[in-house]
Amino acid sequence: DGGITQSPKYLFRKEGQNVTLSCEQNLNHDAMYWYRQDPGQGLRLIYYSQIVNDFQKGDIAEGYSVSREKKESFPLTVTSAQKNPTAFYLCASSMEQRPLHHNYGYTFGSGTRLTVV
Amino acid sequence: AQSVTQLDSHVSVSEGTPVLLRCNYSSSYSPSLFWYVQHPNKGLQLLLKYTSAATLVKGINGFEAEFKKSETSFHLTKPSAHMSDAAEYFCVVISEGGLSNTGKLIFGQGTTLQVKP
């Protein structure tokens, strides 16, 4: 079955460490996204990529980095510069780059819960 | 700029009674609106979407929402709550208007639905 796989489900990080969250999709979607979820704040966009080898900052990109070397993969690195990384991270993908088609087909992964210890 | 406001952070209903989750949006364009549901530590599942077709949208699990342009609202309803409906619900609008904003989801703050037996 097609879908998005995020791993690991739970991740613990010591202060000062970089960690990388994996996101893989086999839906042949062009666009991929990373969101951060905190209680009472909904989801906030960290980074997104509409095409391989290209990505843009979202609303809260500071302290994060991404790469998009393959269409299927969009890993997120939480760096030591991110002062409050404890959160639930969701990856998503969609098949349309432009809004005019109104057929986004967003699919979400099951998330990674990151905790700083 | 597009935005959504979910008017209640927490809603509690009894099983078998109606559900109303309120959402107001702000958009310069004809918006694309969505409702997503999230069960604890899970990803997001699409309940329904409005993309300028019928104003009354029917979704999965008996949910529906009505797009009211005059009130800039997109409230989610269900005639009879079930225990399995207990979850967090997000109202979402698509960011539109320019290449740098294409296809990004903008989330409301979320409404936690509690269903009492």
Image (cartoon, coloured by chain):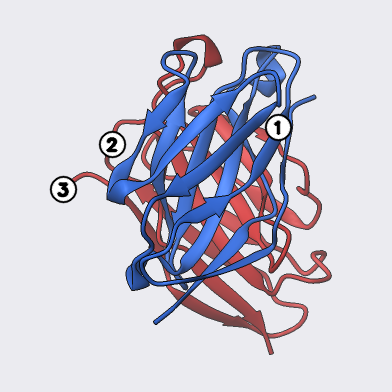
Q: Amino acid at mark 3?
A: Asp
Tags 3 and 1 on a common chain: no
Residue position marked by numbered label 2 in the rendering: A27
Give the camera-side residue of B4 and A90.
Answer: B4
Q: State the CA–CA distance, disc 3 to disc 1.
A: 35 Å
What chain does mark 3 sit on?
A
Number of the front mark, 3 or 1: 1
Q: Residues within 10 Å of mark 1 (few under 14, many from 20)?
A: many
Q: Amino acid at mark 2?
A: Leu
**Mark 3 secondary-structure assignment:** loop
Residue position marked by numbered label 1 in the rendering: B25
Tags 2 and 3 on a common chain: yes
Q: Residues within 10 Å of mark 3 (few under 14, many from 20)?
A: few
What's the colour of chain B in the image?
A: blue
Q: Which mark is residue A32?
A: none
Residue at (77%, 69%) from the top-left corner? Answer: A80
Q: Looking at the picture, how far across and down is residue B79, in whole percent?
A: 38, 51
Whether residue B16 is visible, yes or no, is yes
**Mark 1 secondary-structure assignment:** strand
Q: Is residue B106 left or right of residue B43?
A: right
Q: Which chain is red?
A: A
Q: Quadrant of residue A41?
A: bottom right
Whether residue A53 is visible, yes or no, is no
Give the camera-side residue of A53 and B54.
Answer: B54
What chain does mark 1 sit on?
B
Residue position marked by numbered label 3 in the rendering: A1
Residue at (31%, 47%) from the top-left corner? Answer: B62
Q: Looking at the picture, how far across and down is residue A113, in whole percent?
A: 54, 73
